């Protein structure tokens, strides 16, 4: 009897072990099947080994980082001499930095803010590699196969990297879901009225500035060229570390002659608590291609006003540039802010893609700026961005990219297109269903100058664009949105409208695509500043006015 009992116990333990092992296998199998690339997921994860979803996510994130480092190292062998390779080398470096930050974040206790950071960085890393492939297409098109074959190793590594990061993003979203946040229930920060702006003093603190720097900054403030107020909710405030002046005709020897020279003088890898490096650019036309690199964080450029301080260039795809490299102003450094400037790309409509501003800076903001171009004027490339009271001119896809972007109280001005062309205001580039990206346009005025203007078209498969509480003038086509090519992305895109007004806002004859929606307030609130770009965490320290919720 005792022997039978022992035998029964042994068999039970064996069956339990087998059952538990099968459960782990089934769980991992199902987990990988839920990602966009199951074979890649299964090839990386230790099939049969028990583990948590967060543990599996960590494995793939580390593998993605290792692969990106190998890709970056491979550029030393290729000695980049072409536009696409230059772009890809820069983008691979950004990806290594972003995945390194992800690898650090996942080791901490993850609250809502940290999870949003993690998903944002993974989304951006994925966008970087998609952009690299796009740069090859810009230059090579479909005909120069030998050019592509010569770079086969690079393209293969990039394609593999896209799949690894996509799996990392899917598993991370499963492992660290964003719980409901109490801050989402707080009333949104109110917008300061013009009278309040004039009467209230900005909360500005200075960190180790000279008396002359203080005088320059006070002059900028008095003339109305600083970023006005502290946060609309009355919290935070602008901290200034140093103020410099750009004036090519200045008689003082301490003024910089170019904007790039002033940026080069900014400290490297500054943190928000160090304060802003403020560059006051006096009125004038600056014919230079301005770059704020990734190691120049918390830089603020303030001009004398729209159409007074003007940065201009004319790079374009027809003349040999990539779209990515054509920007007159390219911003990468975290926390970048600009106010009261105009940025132009004057290449003209016949030169096709020609970017005025390319923004790849996390937690960046533009206030009272003007962006002027034709095709691809404003490239909202990646990470979290905010635009307030800006004027944006263009024709084809003139607001495009794959950042998490909110444009608020702006003027969108579609220009007269070339004969046979139509205007598309947006071409959002979300390529993966788990990216937390999209374009949200709120309380703006849309005043087209020609018929055949559409609200947007799907550049990538999971394109996401919403229009909230805008005024739409009469030249908006009745169908609202246009196809990219045939039925591409019509099932998977997310396009939505909420409480827009004006003769172009009528939704009765809009497209009937599965991905198009007229949404209610509950859905619309997710695309506001407080939720979509978690603006309450970072906008108050910039002094840019904003509305956190619906208006």
Image: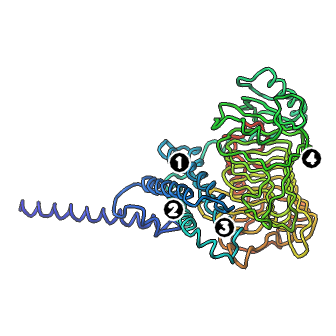
Judging depth in this view, the residue of 24 and 311 nearest the camera is: 311
Q: Quadrant of residue 433?
A: bottom right
Coordinates of residue 334 in the picture (x, y in percent) = 67, 43
Numbered tag placed on residue 136 in the rendering: 3
Q: CA distance from mark 2 to mark 4?
A: 45 Å
Q: CA distance from mark 1 to mark 3?
A: 26 Å
Q: Is residue 21 above or below residue 389?
A: below
Q: Position of residue 281 (x, y in %)?
A: 84, 38
Query: Horizontal and vertical percent for residue 510?
Result: 80, 71
Which mark is first along the chain, 3 or 1? Answer: 1
Q: Earlier in the sequence, mark 2 or mark 1?
A: 1
Closer to the N terminus: mark 4 or mark 1? 1
Classify mark 3: helix, strand or loop: helix
Q: Earlier in the sequence, mark 3 or mark 2?
A: 3
Alpha-carbon span between mark 3 and mark 2: 21 Å
- Relative to 184, residue 208 above or below: above
Q: Which residue is mark 4?
A: 307
User: Label 3 neighbourhood size at 10 Å, few (<14), some (14-19), many (20+)?
Assistant: many
Q: Secondary structure at mark 4?
A: loop
Mark 3, mark 4: which one is toward the viewer? 3
Residue drawn 47% across the image and 44% down it? 107
- Within-10-Å neighbours for mark 1: few <14, some 14–19, many 20+: some
Q: Which mark is residue 489?
A: none
Which circle's residue, 2 or 4, is located before the other in the chain? 2
The residue that disc 2 covers is: 164
Q: Which residue is mark 1?
A: 100
- Judge left or right: residue 89 versus residue 424: left
Tell me, yes or no, if residue 526 can be seen here.
yes
Q: Quadrant of the N terminus?
A: bottom left
Could you tell me if the residues under marks 2 and 1 are in contact, i.e. CB atoms within 8 Å? no
């Amino acid at each position: 009897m005792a022997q039978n009992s022992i035998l029964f116990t042994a068999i039970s333990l064996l069956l339990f072990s087998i059952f538990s092992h099968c459960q782990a296998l089934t769980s991992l199998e199902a987990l990988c099947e839920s990602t966009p690339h199951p074979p890649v997921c299964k090839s990386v994860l230790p099939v049969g080994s028990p583990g948590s979803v967060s543990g599996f996510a960590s494995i793939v994130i580390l593998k993605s980082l290792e692969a990106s480092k190998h890709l970056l190292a491979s550029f030393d062998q290729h000695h980049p001499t072409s536009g696409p390779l230059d772009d890809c080398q820069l983008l691979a470096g950004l990806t290594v930095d972003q995945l390194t930050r992800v690898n650090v974040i996942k080791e901490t206790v993850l609250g809502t803010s940290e999870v949003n950071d993690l998903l944002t960085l993974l989304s951006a890393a994925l966008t970087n590699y998609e952009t690299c492939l796009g740069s090859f297409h810009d230059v090579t098109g479909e005909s120069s196969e030998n050019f592509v074959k010569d770079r086969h190793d690079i393209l293969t590594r990039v394609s593999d990297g896209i799949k690894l990061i996509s799996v990392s993003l899917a598993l991370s979203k499963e492992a660290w879901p964003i719980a409901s946040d109490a801050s989402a229930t707080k009333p949104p920060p109110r917008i300061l009225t013009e009278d309040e702006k004039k009467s209230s003093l900005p909360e500005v603190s200075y960190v180790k500035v000279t008396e002359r720097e203080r005088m320059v900054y006070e002059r900028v403030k008095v003339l109305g060229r600083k970023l006005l107020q502290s946060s609309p909710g009355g919290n935070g405030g602008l901290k200034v570390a140093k103020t410099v002046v750009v004036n090519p005709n200045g008689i003082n020897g301490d003024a910089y002659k170019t904007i790039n020279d002033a940026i080069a003088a900014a400290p490297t890898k500054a943190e928000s608590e160090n304060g802003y490096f403020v560059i006051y650019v006096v009125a004038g036309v600056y014919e230079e291609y301005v770059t704020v690199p990734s190691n120049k964080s918390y830089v603020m450029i303030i001009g004398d006003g729209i159409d007074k301080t003007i940065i201009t260039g004319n790079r374009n795809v027809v003349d040999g540039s990539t779209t990515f490299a054509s920007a007159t102003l390219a911003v990468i450094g975290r926390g970048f802010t600009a106010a009261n400037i105009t940025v132009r790309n004057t290449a003209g409509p016949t030169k096709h893609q020609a970017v005025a501003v390319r923004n790849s800076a996390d937690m960046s903001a533009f206030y009272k700026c003007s962006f002027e171009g034709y095709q691809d004027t404003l490239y909202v490339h990646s990470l979290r961005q905010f635009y307030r009271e800006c004027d944006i001119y263009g024709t084809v896809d003139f607001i495009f990219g794959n950042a998490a972007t909110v444009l608020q109280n702006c003027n969108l001005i579609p220009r007269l297109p070339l004969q046979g062309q139509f205007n598309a205001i947006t071409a959002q580039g979300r390529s993966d269903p788990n990216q937390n990206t999209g374009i949200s346009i709120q309380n703006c005025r849309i005043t087209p100058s020609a018929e055949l203007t559409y609200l947007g078209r799907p550049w990538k498969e999971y394109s996401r664009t919403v229009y909230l509480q805008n005024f739409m003038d009469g030249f908006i086509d009745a169908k609202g949105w246009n196809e990219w090519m045939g039925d591409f992305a019509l099932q998977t895109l997310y396009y939505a409208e909420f409480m827009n007004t004006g003769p172009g806002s009528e939704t009765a004859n809009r497209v009937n695509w599965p991905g198009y929606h007229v949404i209610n307030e509950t859905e619309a609130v997710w695309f506001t500043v407080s939720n979509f770009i978690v603006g309450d965490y970072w906008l108050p320290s910039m002094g840019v006015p904003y509305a956190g919720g619906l208006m």
